[in-house]
Image (cartoon, rainbow, N blue to C red):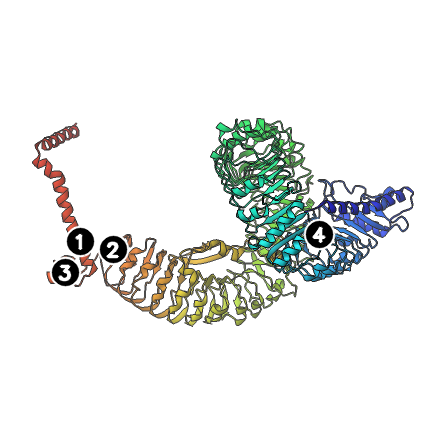
Amino acid sequence: MTTPYFVALFHLLLLYSFGFSVRFKESRKSGESNCREKERQALLNFKQSLTADYGRLSTWTDHQNNTDCCNWEGIQCNHQTGHVILLDLRCLDTHYLTGAINLTSLIPLQYIQHLDLSNNDFLLNHIPQAIGSFTNLQYLNLSFSAFSGRIPFQLGNLSLLKYLDLGTNSLLGSVPFQIGNLKQLQYLDLGGNNYLSGEIPFQLGNLKQLQYLDLGGNYLSGEIPLQLRNLKRLQYLNLASNTLSGAIPFRNGNLPHLQTLGLGGDFYVEAEDSQWLSNLHSLTSLELTSLHNLSSSRQWLQAISELIPNLVKLRLVDCFLSDTNIKSLFHPRSDFSTSLTVLDLSSNVLTSSTFQLLFNFSLHLQELYLRGNDIALSSFLFPNFPSLNILDLSWNNLTSSVFQRNFNFGSNLRNLRLYNCSLTDKSFPISSASTINSSSSLVILDLSSNLLKSSTVFYWLLNFTTNLQTLSLSGNLLEGPIPDGFGKVMNSLERFFASENRLQGKIPSFFGNMCRLQILYLRNNKFNGEISHFFQNSSWCNKHVFHNLDLSYNQITGKIPESIRLLSELEDLSLRGNSLEGDVTESHLSSFSKLYDLDLSHNSLSVKFVSSWVPPFQVKTLRLASCKLGPSFPGWLQTQNSLMWLDISDNELNNSVPAWFWNNLQNLGWLNMSHNNLNGAIPDIPLKLPYGPSIILNSNQFEGALPPFLLQASGLLLSRNTISDLYSFLCHQIIAPNLATLDLSNNHITVEIPDCWQSLHQLLFLDLSHNKLSGNIPISMGKLVKLEALVLRKNNLTGGLHSSLKNCTNLIMLDVSENNLSGRIPSWIGERMQQLRILNMRGNHFSSNFPIQLCYLRYIQLLDLSRNKLSKAVPTCLNNFTAMSEKSINRTETQRLIYGYNITYDEIYGPYASFDYKLDITWVWKGVAHVFRDPQYNLKSIDLSCNDLSGEIPKEVVCLVGLVSLNLSRNNLSGEIPSEIGNLSSLESLDLSRNHLHGRIPSSLSQLDFLGKLNLSYNSLSGRIPLGRHLQTFEASSFEGNIDLCGEQVNKSCPGDHTTAKPEEAGGGDGDDSVFYEALYMSMGLGFFVGFWGLIGPILIWKPWRIAYLRFLNRLTTEIQL
């Protein structure tokens, strides 16, 4: 959101830099400067930390004829002292620097005044604290360079700084208040980082020289500090797209020179605030986001209306504005047609009438954004915007006739966005395509995420426009092949996106004949045929510009031809999830010098690279899962210094991992080597993992102890190995700052659980199940206060649950089943762990009663206390289990709670943290133990079987209408089965066997349509087993051991089944059953009478029918005899 003023300001800053350039180029010509050796070596060390520079630093060499670093590209020196004072490596084209740079290597440049590393890719590296040692800096620009981590507070030491730009990175955490010490600062940009959180430090009000302040596009909260009133020179203030709140602190006379204003948050809207706004006479750009009270404030709407004649840009996003509000802003007396060029009214509640209204004020409007409203256009409502370049109507419900007749939004329209507008094939009638005005100006068209199905849209496009450069059809329902005519006509197309459809047939070879095509995404369709057809039947006239190809998740077959190397400019190649076969060798990839993303996973390919091969590329992302890399570990990976993401899982690798590989982990953010046969111990080396990677090594043969350096990971998954020791891993007093997930299940750990978990205080998921751990659960586990899942199933643990665990109040899953734990079930489980969804304590020695406090677990879905020694009655408070009392569960909310992203996670665990650990639950389901991988969120079960519970089944259980499985078998329960048990309409499994229940089986059981397993055996039940629906389908084993039961299911007649009831007994003993059978017999008699006389009667009485019937029998007899 820039204005002409700030363009001028930027140019002045460039001239400021250019002043250095002129002076020092002249000084180099005169031979007066000669850089210092210490500084020259620092620059060379900095270059070494880069993995790619595309030749930009070719002059940075150690050759004898090039020792003066003052002559190197991007460097300027003081002509008197030889000290480096300017380093400008900003990228102005596609040749950006790449690598996890080491800024600390530049510390010897103590006299540097100007440092610009913007528009590069530094792989989410952190800005080091040492940045504060460059105390002579006046200009620092690290924007658009993929930095992550916290903003170092040491920046507050740079007292001479005038220009600071850290915008559009992935920085997180709070804004350091020490920035308020930079009293000479004129330009401060921290916008567009998305993850900056906390409050705006009031110390920023000390920056009296500040003219430009951008904190927009973050997650800042709280109130705007009053001290920002002091910034009297401020001309640009952007606080939009945040979650700020409270009062707006500015009053009349504050910020008088403001030209650009952006505010984001649910502020209190006061009348006096509107007075301040209306007096900002220099304002040319206004952005208000998420100001939900705006629609109800007449004063604010009036103030904005008065500003409109001077505004060039106006954005009112997510402010609950209606058509009425817009009419009050743009009333007929308004005259702003000569100034307003950008209007954004997205995410409001506007309709088509607003769209029509804007036509009256559209003379110079160049950009119009109306996404996320209730606009439903028809072909009769097309206003013509003569100057419009960009129109965004995404997330509206446009009518099917929108593209019929005279479709034309303006002769200068270049960018039309109709994402998710419910468009169908009827929206693009071929019959009218020849009558509509061809849009020769349109170059970008987004029709993704609609309901398009047939090839109609392709034929419509051929008639509508032939000058498209970018076309997106992804996320529709498109079927069939892409018409050949599309490739012949769309010669201007540069970017084509058609992923997530149902397109079929061979991949059209005409894409290789579209000479401008650069990007082709056809992911997740149903394309088939051999891949060689695609590569070998094209001219590939676009091979010098074609750089992105994604054909993943189709049905493509055959061998990858070596002719693929013709596409020498490829940067991103994905063929994942097809049926490709054959060998992939060095010759296939020998020309891909620019490749940075390669994905060949999940085919039937064999990647056969010579171990000593040195690829011409440096990939950042390499996915080769299931590519038969083995049996030897791929040695050529040693050459890949830019790797951030590596997946070589399921590759039949059989040997040990070489030492050099572990040393290269320092740049990785994601590593998956699971499902191989890698063996040996992971070496204990002093390695730093600055990116907190996710490391997935499941299903291998790694053994011994784990080295402490792995504690720096954000996720460590090592299940199904032969790890045998935990102590050396956990108890070295090394803090695990990023570890969110630790899965060591199914290993050979036989010792006691070490009591040193305090160093893993950030842990979210811990799984130590299926080992042979012994002893007590250690006290220090109570330090894991962020823990969401604790799984200790299937070990040899003894003792009780230590009270320190009550500090783990965020637990969603607690599984201590199949151990030797004893004592009472602690009451604090219900009192403190009220987020629990899954509680599994089966197969232990817990005794005493079922604690009533467990009824506080209102979100519980899976409760298993079976196979313990619990006694006394089942509490009557089971109806407090709210989640089980509802037939449906908000699955999205449950998933969000377990795996959901939290804004603080990036700050704590790093940008590569993996939270996709799946909860493995062993659950006895319908009498059989099953493993549920990331269990069904609609699975709700109570299992209290195999205890010593007594008393009656509480009637309150019938309130749990969402319950799917109930098992109370093998206890000492007595009394009758609750008569309203039929209310449990979701029940699929019911086991009440081997108790002392008596009385009749309630007839309401027949109402349970989903009941698939029923076991009432070995009780003292009596009377007739109810019939109805499918209840009679259960076998006799479901009822055996109840000698007084009778009925069809047990093949035993009930008293009175074969005798005629006396009249006086007819309404007696059998109750509902006798009435039922009386009605049944009467219906059978009546049916026989009607059927007999309806068919046989006419034959006997009416002669023509009788003759016809006898003739039919004669013919039938004759045919049978023949």
Residue ID for mark 4: 258
Q: Earlier in the sequence, mark 4 or mark 3?
A: 4
Tag 1's secondary structure? helix
Residue ID for mark 1: 1079
Q: Residues within 10 Å of mark 3 (few under 14, many from 20)?
A: some
Q: Earlier in the sequence, mark 1 or mark 4?
A: 4
Q: Is residue 789 left or right of residue 940?
A: right
Q: Residues within 10 Å of mark 4 (few under 14, many from 20)?
A: many
| Distance CA(mark 4)–CA(mark 2) | 81 Å
| Distance CA(mark 3)–CA(mark 1) | 12 Å
Tag 2's secondary structure? loop
Using the rendered view, name the quadrant where residue 1106 is placed. Answer: top left
Residue type beneath disc 1 = Ala
Q: Position of residue 996 (x, y in %)?
A: 30, 68
Residue type beneath disc 3 = Ala
Residue ID for mark 2: 1027
798 in relation to 376, above or below: below
| Distance CA(mark 1)–CA(mark 4) | 89 Å
Q: Earlier in the sequence, mark 1 or mark 2?
A: 2
889 or 610, nearer to the observer: 889
Task: Name the front one of labels 1 and 2.
Answer: 1
Q: Position of residue 139 (x, y in %)?
A: 78, 51
Tag 4's secondary structure? loop
| Distance CA(mark 4)–CA(mark 3) | 95 Å
695 or 173, nearer to the observer: 173
- Residue 933 in view (yes/no): no
